Amino acid sequence: MFKFILKRILEAIPTMLILITVSFFLMRFAPGSPFSSERTLPPQVMANINAKYGLDKPVFDQYTTYLTNVLQGDLGPSFKYKDFTVNELVVSALPVSAKIGALAFIFAVVFGVSVGTLAALRQNSWLDYAVMSTAMLGIVMPSFVLAPVLIYIFSIGLGWFPAGGWLDGSLQYMVLPVLGMAMMYVATFARITRGSMIEVLNSNFIRTARAKGLSYSYIVVKHALKPAMLPVISYMGPAFVGIITGSVVIETIFGLPGIGKLFVNAAFNRDYSLVMGVTILIGFLFILFNAIVDILLAYVDPKIRY
Amino acid sequence: MITKKENIDALEKFSENLEIEGRSLWQDARMRFMRNKAAMVSLVILVLITLSVIIAPLLSQYAFDDTDWYAMHAAPSAEHLFGTDSLGRDLFVRTLLGGQISLMVGVLGALVAVVIGTVYGATSGFIGGRVDRMMMRILEILYSIPFMFLVIVLVTFFGRNIYLIFIAIGAIAWLDMARIVRGQTLSLRNKEFIEAAHVSGVSQWNIIRRHIIPNVLGIVAVYSTLLVPSMILTESFLSFLGLGVQEPMTSWGALLQEGAQTMEIAIWQLSFPAAFMVVTLFCFNYIGDGLRDALDPKDR
């Protein structure tokens, strides 16, 4: 197991380097510069600015400098927010996204798996059909449709929750963003759980367990749940990626000061260093989470370890 | 007591009566698909939506960019079936036109993804060995790159061009396709019936044509139908952020964004595009599910 974890972590390193390289050169060869939108500056001033941000050096030197800085955890200064470094901006925005994302993720897994299991246990009953058609609705209803609908019903109609804002993360400000973000993944987790649960419940070892006279609930919890979780765990990686990507939309709709909003604003402002920084950070999170998922899978299914 | 001869005769007679018409994989699949009510209904609705999206804007008396200053934010009426938007443009025409764009991007994007993914996956699976390992390693690296963010960067920096958008999102989505096709070819390559074909002297090309392609095609068809809705979603996602289709052209995502801003005073600006998009996505998903059930050899 230790060897597997070590191997998995070592594999992530070249991926990370490639990600940094790609985003660096993408930014460098993008047309326009973060300073070109301002009124024309005298060439001397321009040269000064370029010197300050190291843009006057050869591209390869810039690349190596940037790479060493990033490896030391320094994402450089922001081009647009002059008094801030990228690190400071990210540190102030990350907790917001992390809080919402983590809640949405936990909600999606817990609720989705339990509903899916329930539907599998009552296969082809009205409950199963109800759950599965609701799940289909959840899948086809993207967050940018669901979120306005939620606001329309719960904020404008019923007035239960605020339509946007953050207020230092108080609970009632988080309900709608979390719901809007999680619904699609609740639905997907429910569908996946139902499918794999039915397959597991039809397998021979479950029949053996029933023949032994074990109680049904004991069989489900003790024997069926673990193997049925395999596809669920593999979907956690994509779900995590989707939730982070979705934060761009959700944070825009609800006006939350998170990473997604920061990224969109940075892209619109052509704040290259900030865009690069956020891309690298998110890529790092993707890689980290995929590694965790792989390790979890290997833990649940020993076949993968070898 | 029957003799052996009688036995054989009886068997022959029995087998003559049994003479049933052989059904090919696709005939079988079609029959099973036709029996699936949800999928058939979805197919009909989808065809209707597609036709109306193509034809109806041509028949309407309004053009998609005609503004009517006397009917801004007008509610649905006989004159404007779906009402009008903030500039007094007819929402019926705009919703259908947006559907045209969304469906086009969805289908073309899925096509790009399917072609790249199938070629990559099939190559990797056929050649196998070291090449296969290399190609899969590259795929894994691509998997952990936050593409949605790169697309946003690309679109903001290199201009908001619809072709760029669907090439970009199509190029993202081929990863899953490649994995699926590779797995399928890999497992097919070692199947007994392929070996049997080899032994009985069938040429390599005929094995690919008769055995590999039909078997891979099923799964490709299923995932293409499921790719289209996810392409439509991606395009809407970008349009929602204001990075997709540009005014005065529109797509479902762009309409939803406008609708979400004005829903307090004009809910129809959100509800009609949303309903169209959700119904379309529903249909694609049910058709995909139906195809999967119809083509799944495990069920036979």
Image (cartoon, rainbow, N blue to C red):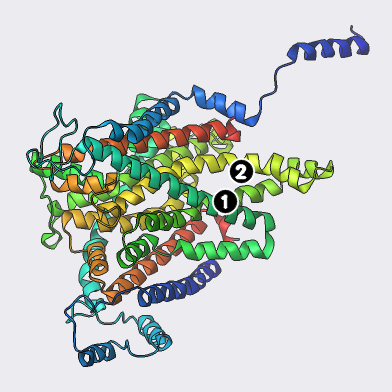
Instruction: Left or right? Give the position of A150 relative to B227.
Output: left
Q: Mark 2 — residue?
A: B216
The chain containing the residue under callout 2 comes to B
The kind of secondary structure element at disc 1 is: helix
The kind of secondary structure element at disc 2 is: helix
Q: CA distance from mark 1 to mark 2?
A: 9 Å
Q: Position of residue A245 (x, y in %)?
A: 32, 58
Residue appearing at x 19%, y 30% in the figure: B81
Residue A215 visible in image: no
Q: In this orientation, which residue lies closer to the viewer: B122 or B52?
A: B52
Q: Mark 1 — residue?
A: B118
Query: Mark 2 and mark 1 in contact (Cβ < 8 Å)?
Result: yes
Instruction: Left or right? Give the position of B250 relative to A168.
Output: right
Q: Which quadrant holds residue A293?
A: bottom left
Q: In this orientation, which residue lies closer to the viewer: B183 or A289?
A: B183
Instruction: Left or right? Give the position of B145 relative to B127.
Output: left
Q: Position of residue B203 (x, y in %)?
A: 79, 45
Q: Position of residue A265 (x, y in %)?
A: 22, 66
Q: Is residue B140 above or below residue A87?
A: above
Label located before the other in sequence (1 or 2): 1
Residue appearing at x 43%, y 44% in the figure: B107
Location of the C terminus of chain A by quadrant is bottom right
The chain containing the residue under callout 1 comes to B
Amino acid tagged 2: Val
Neighbour tally class for label 2: few under 14, some 14-19, many 20 plus, Cα within 10 Å: some
